[in-house]
């Protein structure tokens, strides 16, 4: 090291100046900050560790035909011959590539805090040899990872070659890598990150009940495979769990096969007890969404894959772009899953059913669940040219069951105290207004027609809609909110919606309460 470094000098000779400050006998690509060094590197030296020559995203189309630059949908990538190496050379290249990918993901904010991971497998029946599966370890800083940290496994998840550092642990995602290999036989590379864009995309539905994220009419939809610009891309969403994988058996332990440590035994028992993990959900959506090349995990991150590491990386980057686009579009009041009605290319689907108005009840005598309303229109959308929006209360800003189970019982329970707070003349006026709204059928069910409390409790029980009762209820509710006895309910999507538009709220049942 001393001899080459000691021979470096700034050249004062004009004839040497164009070569930079290195001696002539050192190759220019060793000094990429010089012009000649940059030309040497960028003319023929690729930046990524290569496993094969000539990769391209354009391979086969969705119909199995060979694709070209004009193809709408691409299902697989293409590549040239593998870079022939012996087994040790191949393993060294794959391990180095995984370290390089992890560093890249960290720099993009996708693998912070030791999160995320990469899996690559090589070999297989097409090459007439067993699969070799290389897996990034868990719990280490991805930007500082080296190839010697990577596990090599077989297709039974047995450790073939452990990392050089004996304390390394396999990624908790390892069981999921193998589920993807099982349901997607052509997949050779899988990426998992905790991208903030992916996490926020799973929360676009404020109820957190949606089973998928749908996106359409965005150019980058073409980058995720199997889809064209105007297709509806559907990415399945599963719920997060304390751990990614299902239980492991002792034969798949990272420890030596002849000795089981106490720490490892505890890990196995813990894994066995956590039966409700991601694996079962993951396997279900892999079967349900055959065109999906990614799975979102709510409040967690995303898994994406491809038939090569290049395709997995390309598709993951496209997904992340789309997730960010979806989040930003929602901020603008635009639904990423709706076909644009004008202003851009679209093909109208005349068979598409029109949205049906959901039937809901008001002041019902039984509990009314409006979950169907929420599932049919998860987030209120403001028309682009609107300045104000007039909102109802029940079933729109507030749960109908809140009115039935909280507001009405509050009136029945507190009506006596409310009546006592009134003057005799006010009580007389209220009594007459209530009687004016009663029919003979109502009167027959009231225990004491001269008692305001008895009349009100009966009217609430019979769900009688009357002006006198509504006025009194509104005054009682207003007082209840002011003294803290009542606390209102609003849907989770209302606060962000109110940031998008000015709203005026009306009620069909009590102006006094507004």
Image (tube, helix red, strand yellow):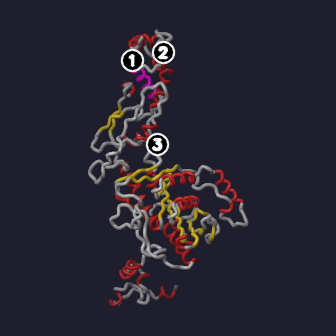
Residue 453's tag is 2
| Image quadrant in which you'd find residue 155 | bottom right
Q: Earlier in the sequence, mark 1 or mark 3?
A: 3
504 over 364 or under it: above or below = below
481 over 201 or under it: above or below = above
Q: Residue at x 39, y 65 (%)?
A: 65
Q: Nearer the viewer, residue 42 or 38?
A: 42
| Image quadrant in which you'd find residue 244 | bottom right
The range drawn in magenta is 467-481
Residue 83 in the image: state x and y as whole percent. Answer: 49, 77
**SS at mark 2 in the image:** helix
Nearer the observer, disc 2 or disc 3?
3
User: Where does label 3 land, which residue?
Assistant: 207
Q: Residue at x 42, y 27 (%)?
A: 362
Alpha carbon separation for disc pair 2 and 3: 39 Å
Residue 135 vs residue 444: left or right?
right
**SS at mark 1 in the image:** helix
The answer to whether residue 146 shows anywhere in this view is no
Q: Is residue 469 magenta?
A: yes
């Amino acid at each position: 090291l001393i001899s080459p470094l000691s021979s470096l000098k700034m050249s004062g000779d004009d004839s040497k100046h164009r070569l930079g400050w290195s001696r002539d006998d050192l190759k220019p690509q060793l000094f990429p900050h010089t012009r000649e060094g940059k030309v040497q590197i960028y003319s023929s030296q690729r930046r990524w560790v290569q496993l094969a020559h000539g990769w391209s995203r354009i391979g086969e189309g969705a119909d199995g035909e060979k694709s070209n630059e004009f193809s709408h949908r691409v299902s697989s990538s293409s590549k040239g011959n593998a870079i022939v190496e012996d087994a040790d050379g191949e393993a060294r290249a794959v391990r180095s590539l995984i370290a390089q990918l992890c560093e890249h993901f960290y720099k993009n904010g996708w693998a912070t805090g030791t999160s995320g991971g990469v899996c690559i497998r090589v070999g297989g029946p097409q090459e007439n040899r067993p699969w070799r599966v290389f897996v990034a370890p868990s719990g280490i800083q991805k930007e500082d990872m080296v190839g010697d940290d990577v596990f090599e496994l077989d297709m039974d998840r047995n450790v073939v070659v452990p990392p050089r550092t004996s304390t390394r642990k396999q990624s908790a995602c390892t069981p999921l890598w193998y589920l993807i290999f099982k349901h997607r036989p052509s997949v050779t590379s899988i990426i998992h990150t905790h991208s903030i864009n992916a996490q926020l995309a799973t929360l676009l539905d404020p109820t957190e009940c949606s089973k998928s994220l749908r996106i359409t009419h965005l150019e980058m939809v073409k980058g995720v495979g199997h889809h064209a610009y105007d297709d509806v891309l559907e990415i399945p969403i599963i719920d997060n769990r304390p751990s990614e994988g299902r239980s492991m058996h002792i034969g798949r332990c990272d420890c030596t096969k002849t000795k089981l440590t106490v720490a490892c035994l505890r890990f196995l028992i813990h894994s066995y007890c956590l039966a409700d993990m991601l694996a079962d959900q993951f396997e279900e959506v892999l079967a349900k969404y055959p065109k999906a090349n990614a799975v979102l995990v709510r409040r967690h991150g995303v898994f994406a894959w491809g038939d090569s590491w290049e395709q997995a990386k390309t598709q993951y980057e496209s997904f992340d772009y789309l997730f960010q686009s979806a989040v930003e579009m929602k901020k603008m009041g635009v639904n990423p899953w709706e076909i644009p009605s004008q202003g851009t290319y679209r093909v109208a689907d005349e068979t598409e059913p029109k949205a049906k108005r959901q039937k809901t009840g008001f002041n019902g005598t039984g509990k009314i669940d409006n979950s169907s309303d929420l599932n049919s229109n998860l987030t209120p959308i403001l028309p682009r040219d609107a300045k104000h929006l007039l909102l109802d209360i029940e079933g729109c800003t507030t749960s109908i069951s809140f009115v039935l189970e909280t507001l009405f019982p509050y009136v029945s329970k507190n009506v006596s105290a409310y009546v006592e707070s009134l003057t005799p003349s006010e009580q007389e006026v209220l009594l007459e207004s209530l009687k004016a709204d009663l029919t003979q059928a109502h009167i027959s069910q009231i225990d004491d027609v001269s008692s305001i409390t008895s009349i009100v409790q009966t009217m609430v029980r019979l769900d009688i809609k009357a002006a006198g009762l509504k006025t009194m209820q509104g005054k009682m509710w207003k007082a209840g909110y002011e003294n803290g006895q009542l606390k209102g309910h609003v849907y989770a999507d209302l606060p962000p919606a109110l940031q998008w538009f000015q709203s005026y709220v009306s009620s069909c049942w009590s102006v006094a309460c507004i």
